[in-house]
Amino acid sequence: MSELQTIVHDVLVIGAGGAGLRAAIEAASRGAKVGVVCKSLLGKAHTVMAEGGMAAAMANVDDRDNWRVHFADTMRGGQYLNNWRMAELHAKEAPERVKELEKWGALFDRTKDGRILQRNFGGHRYPRLAHVGDRTGLEMIRTLQDHGIHEGLDVHMEYTVVTLLHDGERIAGALAYDRERGRFRVFRAKAVVLATGGIGRAFSISSNSWEYTGDGHALAYLAGAALQDMEFVQFHPTGMIWPPSVRGILVTEGVRGEGGVLRNRDGKRFMFENIPDNYKSQTADNEEEGWRYTQGDKDARRPPELLTRDHVARMIVREVKEGRGSPHGGVYLDISWIKDKIPNAAEHIRKKLPSMYHQFKQLANIDITKEPMEIGPTTHYVMGGIRVDGDTQMSTVPGLFACGECAAGLHGANRLGGNSLSDLLVFGKRAGEYAAEFARTRGDVTLDDAEIDAGMQYALAPFERGAGAEGAYQVQDALQSTMQDLVGIVRAQHEMEQALEELEVLKQRAEKVGVPGNREYNPGWHTALDLRNLLIVSEAIARSALARKESRGGHFRDDYPEKDPAFATFNHVVRRRDDGTMELARESIAPLPAELAAIIEEMK
Amino acid sequence: MTATPQSPASTHRAVDAYTAAQQAQDAAAGHGARTFRIWRGADGNGEFRDYTTEAIDGMVVLDAVQQIQAEQANDLAVRWNCKAGKCGSCSAEINGKPRLMCMTRLDELPADEPVSVEPMRAFPHLRDLVTDVSWNFRVKPTITRFTPRPPDAPDGTWRIDQEDVDRVQEFRKCIECFLCQDVCHVLRDHHKHDEFIGPRFLVYAAALEMHPLDTADRTAQLREEHGIGYCNITKCCTKVCPEHITITDNAIIPLKERVVDEFFDPLKALVRLVRGKRR
């Protein structure tokens, strides 16, 4: 393929959100020649939408906080399916990563004595989230972007990766095309870091951007890597629900952290009704105590609105199903009520939650300082992802690393709010560090022309079928309905079996979709190629969820509504068999070292 | 002990009550056909083409464009990401005005005429609604990077007043949609892309200059390389900013004042003469 341009790097990073940029900066700082490939323009990645903050036990607001408490909170939130080594490293290293961001220009809100302010969030025992109003993700990605452009990174914007390339067992780079002109490019690299984010576009109601089509998950799976914990999808309890066009857009948990409460149609704070046993000792049992907690009273326990996301989402669904929902099929989230408690409440809300104020005013004609919001659950995050080594972030394929949302382990069965942004930084840095090390200590790679040819043929096939064939959008739409209706917040065996049947049919339809027009910035073509990835992650989710016959964290079964200790000892892992079918297996969780077990016991 | 299933297997495709409630609401929302006049074509050549599609209450322009893309024109090129006004990707000119498609509601546009949607005009056209905005990404690294003062505390951290954070937050809200660049006549009409960095990057420079920890001085650069003098404060940029940043008054004018102080203050000019030209 002489007309094909080959670009050579030591380390190729796929994805330019928080994890990808942090990985790229780290690898470059260690002397590696680094390329970054991203589907969007630089600085537009999904990280930009993160609102609440990043969790790090800096103890700036409550000096009782430390890494041990953060570790225990993360494990409890993840229902102990977490990779404990990652939970430990994350809790220990997050404070340093936040401070580093400040050194690079990030400006966080401050305490009275001028240190980084930290706010309350669901599942965190102490105020722990460094934040900037409700636009922390923007601050983070802009800081990494503006630092990264001076670090010698070779950034390729608006490129889609078609397939990863091999040199024997080892990863050797990627085949990609530029979305603007449709030209293929070969990226040869000694190590590849996947930082592609999540899978939210597999569902109809989602807070995720179009980019979240599970690309990294699918590329790794096809390259021979294992995916882990795919049954655990987080449905964020508070998404917008009205008008229809905004359904799914995120309403930050920060609203509840600032004192916002959930009420049903009858004005009742239903979250007080059903507090899980393992959180009872930490949760307020009356409204007054909950309010005091949000205002920084260290003796108060947190209000039940700040229980973990999986629980809050299910409680909202219960209210709606039992006929106590709001007019548009959700419940009320009210921050305006704090005007009874503090002076200048409207101004306070606008300052603490500026983008929420703006979002509701502009898109729903609602003034959140005066009236309650209507909200309901929205697909938000996938805990599952590429199985990696906790220290190095290398997958089961040599030279292939993964970090951020596309990697599994840190969050177990459910992620705590605020643990994602810190995840990106802690494990982005580690992936960059170890990928650079891998590239430095291993020899060069050789590419296989046949693998490249096959990739191009696959990518161009939709044009050969042309405009006469079924379009990609119809198949994508059907896939999203299947997952939303049959593998959503509340799951049951017969529904998931049906989903797997429907996915088989959708696979066949996806192989026949056609695309009109040419290769230049053609969204129909991009969508057609996304289908393969969406179908792989959807099947992985459905198969893993079907096999987990219990309810735990983000995974809730109507037919097995209780947690079952028999399922607490292993992670589900999927791999691709040689014949192309998906294999599901159990991998035992390594026993906790005594030191970490003692921490969990102590914090119970 | 392993739990036992509580409901029998069935092959019936059932939508759960929650989804059903949402679907019922969609059906109850107001509907009506609207016409969209969308620019189609490549590399500067093109024409408006009309598409009619069903609009629902509360819809934004991006919804309509995506619906047309899915149902009538699979290859209609449009750049978008978050659809929540946070990423600044879906910039376009709607009824002639630079706006984000995802934050422009149909019910704020005249109902009795087609909604026109065309690409930004200050950048090279690629295809349909998509332009080549890469110039912006080449400009940014030419601005002196953030240069913090030494840490205030032995643990490597700084002490900053909230007041000083608040002062620059306005500039740091920028989502880089480049609508201000699109509307700026220095770029749009006079094509001074080689001599002038545009409002976006003046805001960026202001954010750095007013950052409580930053120690670099960008005034010479602003005057000599970045063409701040080209801005004649017509405030068009401020009017189109979706984040409501008061670009001209709060960012550009203070920067212009710094440049004036630095270069036209006789005392400073003397100092400069003695110390030599600043970098």
Image (cartoon, grey):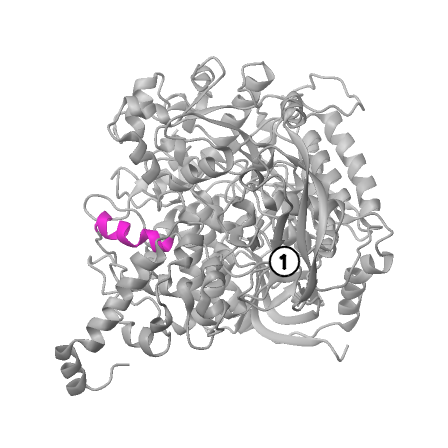
Residue furthest front in the image: B112
Q: Is residue B170 one of those drawn in magenta?
A: yes
Instruction: Name the chain under label 1.
Output: B
Q: Quadrant of residue A64?
A: top left
Total numbered circles: 1
Q: Quadrant of residue B39?
A: bottom right
Task: Identify residue for label 1.
Answer: B129
Q: Is residue A318 above or below residue A12?
A: above
Left or right side of A223 for B162: left
Q: Is residue A74 above or below residue B175?
A: above
Residue occupying the point 50% across, 53% down: B88
Q: Which residues are magenta?
A: B161-172
Q: Nearer the viewer, residue A579 or A39?
A: A39
Left or right side of A480 for A141: left
Residue occupying the point 64% across, 70% down: A187
Q: Secondary structure at mark 1?
A: loop
Q: Quadrant of the N terminus of chain A?
A: bottom right
Left or right side of A599 for B268: left
Q: Amino acid at mark 1?
A: Leu
Residue B47 in the image: x percent, y percent?
70, 60
Q: Nearer the viewer, residue A456 or B244?
A: B244
Asked whether residue A77 is in view, the answer is: yes
Q: Is residue B268 above or below residue B169?
A: below
Residue A337 in the image: x percent, y percent?
35, 23
Residue A381 in the image: x percent, y percent?
55, 41
Q: Quadrant of residue A596?
A: top left
Q: Quadrant of the C terminus of chain A?
A: top left
Asked whether residue A442 is in view, the answer is: no
Residue occupying the point 72% across, 47% down: B51
